Image (tube, helix red, strand yellow):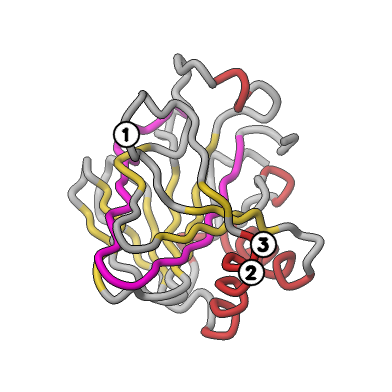
Amino acid sequence: MSTLEAPLLAAQPGIQRLPRRELTLFIKRDFLNAEECDGLVERIEANRRPSTLADDLGYDAFRTSETCDLENSDPFIAAIDARLAAYSGIDPAYGESLQGQRYAVGQEFKAHTDYFEPDGSDFQRYCGRSGNRTWTLMVYLNEPKAGGATRFTQVDKMIQPERGKLVAWNNRRLDGSPNPATLHHGMKVRSGTKYIITKWYREQIWNG
């Protein structure tokens, strides 16, 4: 199955689709429940490390969050990972390992795309075995006291963090080329802490 499409998303009950031709994006509130969100936050807190970045273009403080690798050897993680694949209809063999991110006050991820630039210096390193990223599925695990929204800058869409809310988007155009309209900014947390999980899928079976 090609991961150009996530064939089940559009038909899921209660899902919202952004009404813009230039970007395929879906939002589903309460995808995860409070217990699931709390379990993920606990695991992120226990194993977080400074986030890394490919193609950072030399910007200062471009990505200042912390990251946690969430492994399927944990049955709790494996169950959530499987739900994401089943909900979207994407073959799980194309998925990277699930990641968690933590943003403290003042931390952000400046405007970026999730796909790797084909002419970027790190393209072969990150895409040589499994191809580029196709779909992103992200879930907010809590609501910081202030800030922390995700802004898709090219379509002027701001998404506020809500515990359990899923945001899913296609990083490619219909012809398979990278879609610059997916440019998004994980905005600074002004008060409190923000936690999310992120699942990326690839063009080919994941061989990370």
Q: Residues within 10 Å of mark 2 (few under 14, many from 20)?
A: some
* Mark pair 3, 1: CA separation: 33 Å
Reading the chain from its start, which is encountered first: label 2 or label 1?
Answer: 2
**Sequence-earlier tag: 2 or 3:** 2
Place of residue 135 in the rendered image (x, y in percent of width and height, measured from the top left) = 51, 45
Residue 37: image location, x then y, percent: 54, 76
Q: Residue at x 69, y 50 (%)?
A: 91
Q: Residue furthest right?
A: 73
| Label 2 to label 1: alpha-carbon separation | 29 Å
Residue at figure coordinates x 79%, y 70% from the top left: 75
Classify mark 1: residues with Cα within 10 Å, few (<14), some (14-19) or many (20+).
few
Say what amino acid the circle numbered 2 marks. Answer: Arg
**Which residue corresponds to the image point at 40% horizontal and 34% vertical from the top-left?**
173
Question: Which disc number belongs to residue 81?
Answer: 3
Write down the region rendered in magenta.
176-202
Residue identifier under label 1: 60
How many labels sit on residues? Answer: 3
Above or below 82: residue 179: above
